[in-house]
Image (tube, rainbow, N blue to C red):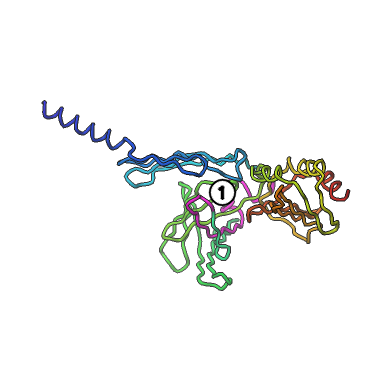
Amino acid sequence: MKKKKVIIIVVAVILIIMLIPFSIVRFKDGGSVEYKSLLYKYTKIHRLNENSSTGYEDGWDLEVLGIHIGGEINTHVQAECCDGCMCGDTLELIKNTESAWTLTEINDKGEYVYDHHSFINFHGTGQNKFAFFKNDDNSKPISEIRGSFSITRNADIVLTPDNSNKEIICKIGKEKDLIAVLECDNNFGTFTLQKQGTLELPNIIEDTMTKTKKIIITGNKNKTITDENDINNFISAISNSKVWTGPVTEPSPNYHIELFDDNNNSIAKIEYNIEHYFNIELNSKYYNLINIDKELLNTIIEK
């Protein structure tokens, strides 16, 4: 009996030791912390996200004995679908529409890296056909797979290539910022679909606007704006806008607009077509803004 108690105590002590973190790492990404013990690795995520309405994304990630158990990230980006858009439930889109999914890698930062030369097309609308095309950087075909697909009760998408009995199972991943994710086995790859809708104005755009001290406009009108009141009105015209994720009709812009900070550094470039779009480039990323106060904006430009 005493021996049994000793064994229980020893096992309990070992378990406690395995649960106590021997390593606590604080990342310089905004505040994420990793706790590592002999049994698990738990990461409390709080990192900078320039597209977030709060400036951060929060979540968690857990591994037990080296096996990934799960995790979740909240980007704090509010999204809205629109009527008649390529949006809504992902399975319904695959079943009832024609959709093109881009081959995508997800890097260590959780960012999407797109291979725009390789993609998979789903032909729903009763056809239930798919076609995968892999091309090189010059769009020269490398491989092509065609076949049919079905959807199981567990919401798995089963791809059956023509002339092959080897099925490929794809599962729907975590959607973020109206980007649907499809993860396929047998090294077939991960694919993403940018749905059509609107996102709240990212924190990075608001921050950049507040740093603006000079605006240079070229095109139908050539002028330089340094007046503080005019700059504030320019910012006000954009402050209530949203990001549109769908396609845009892109005739030539009426205006090229460049923003500069107080050190005369270029901090943003804008292409503005009065009838069709307002595209802003920040840190090599592009955002198409809608719901802009065009009346105020045009008044400032033509002043």
Left or right, 221 with reference to 261: right
Image point (57%, 44%), residue name: 49
Image point (35%, 47%), residue name: 67
Magenta span: 83-111
Image point (79%, 55%), residue name: 273
Residue 103 or 205: which is nearer the viewer? 205
Number of disc labels:
1
Question: What x and y, as percent, mark residue 160?
Answer: 46, 61
Q: For mark 1, what is the residue? A: 90
Left or right, 90 with reference to 9: right
Residue 136 or 107: which is nearer the viewer? 107
Left or right, 196 with reference to 49: right
Report if residue 165 lies within the magenta region: no
Question: What x and y, as percent, mark residue 250?
Answer: 75, 59
Question: What x and y, as percent, mark residue 101?
Answer: 56, 58
Which type of secondary structure does the marked residue at label 1 adopt? helix
Report if residue 93 lies within the magenta region: yes
Q: Is residue 267 above or below residue 9?
A: below
Question: What x and y, as percent, mark residue 120?
Answer: 54, 61
Left or right, 245 with reference to 172: right
Residue 254 location, quadrant: bottom right
